[in-house]
Amino acid sequence: MTTIIDGNEIGDQITAGVAACTDTLVGEAVTPGLATVLMSDDGASETYVSMKQQACEEIGIEGFHYEISADEPAETLFSTIDELNADPAVHGILVQMPVPDHVPKRDVLERIDPMKDVDGFHPENVGRLVAGNARYKPCTPHGIQKILAETGVETEGKDAVVVGRSDIVGKPMANLLIQYGPGGNATTTVCHSRTDDLAEKTRNADIVIAAAGVPEMIDGSMLSAGTTVIDVGINRVDADTEKGYELVGDVDFESAKAKADAITPVPGGVGPLTIAMLMYNTVKAASLQSGVDISLP
Ligand code: NAD
């Protein structure tokens, strides 16, 4: 029987632990604060930001939200970040990506105070992650580590294939999998758009993590029996629905399920963990900045 991994349930468990930490901080007169900044007219980005703000509200994190018109100069975004860096009520800053083309993304990431960089994308935090001394693990890969742990999937000594090499998912995922310790110690292969014979790589994997942003590109014929399949993809494809589209992953769910030992669905798999781990990092940021100890799940 294939286990269909319930990301909502795992996310709720983690969120409950994070909410308890929030209560501890509030009891010490520290209300964790997360600022989200949206500089985009993209509907999906707006949805993601509002989900993040809603999650804050549900667990008692104070949310601050800023919207900057997509045609404003980059300097407007930089000065907003500067103000948030200086604001002691704000412990975490998240600039929703992508930013418009005229805004240099790397400069945005480097502008955020590394202590408030709850996405974990500032070069200082990336360096710490690679060095095995992470401060804030990027939310999606960290959530996947939690999924694997909660599902009882051992990574040590296993062959893991990460499909995708983005800075937000593929690279940090691979880095987490090769670290020493629980959730790591995997023999990890990173595949990407220039990989020859992807199917040969995925067929030899115990764990496949698909983060390519290509609808249903990994199907059952590319997997061996017993594989754990984590589908990160969220792709809008045209469909005869009220909205005119539906969300599908990077994995062809039905054929992959027939081969997999365990598999995440889309939606309801990795997505809820991404938000839960953002709350986790925000509460951790509040703890680090205030010096109040908490015990995160
Ligand atoms: P990205 O576009 O930045 O990176 C995609 C990567 O996939 C690239 O490194 C590219 O080399 C690789 N790739 C593209 N086509 C490929 C192919 N045919 N074969 C092998 N590799 C290929 O995307 P991203 O930001 O890493 O996101 C990936 C997917 O995950 C998207 O669908 C995105 O919406 C989704 N996502 C989901 C969550 C979540 O919380 N569930 C979070 C972040 C991203």
Image (cartoon, helix red, strand yellow):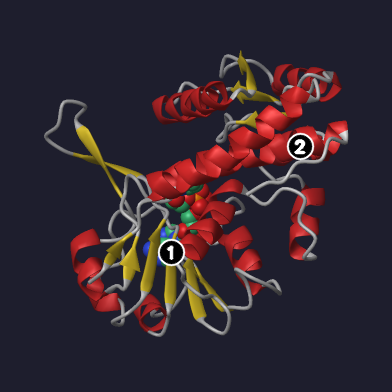
Q: Quadrant of residue 281?
A: top right
Q: Amino acid at mark 1?
A: Thr
Mark 1 or 2, nearer chain start: 1
Left or right for 162, reference 227: right
Provide the residue designation for mark 1: 151
Q: CA distance from mark 1 to mark 2?
A: 27 Å
Residue 189 locus on image (x, y percent): 54, 77
Residue 129 locus on image (x, y percent): 74, 59
Reply above or below: 103 against 171: above
Q: Secondary structure at mark 2?
A: helix
Provide the residue designation for mark 2: 285
Q: Is residue 118 visible?
A: no
Left or right for 231, reference 115: left
Give the label, 1 or 2, closer to the camera. 1
Left or right for 26, reference 52: right
Left or right for 51, reference 247: right
User: Residue drawn 72% across and 48% down?
Assistant: 136
Q: Amino acid at mark 2?
A: Ala
Which residue reaches farthest left?
240
Q: Is residue 258 visible?
A: yes
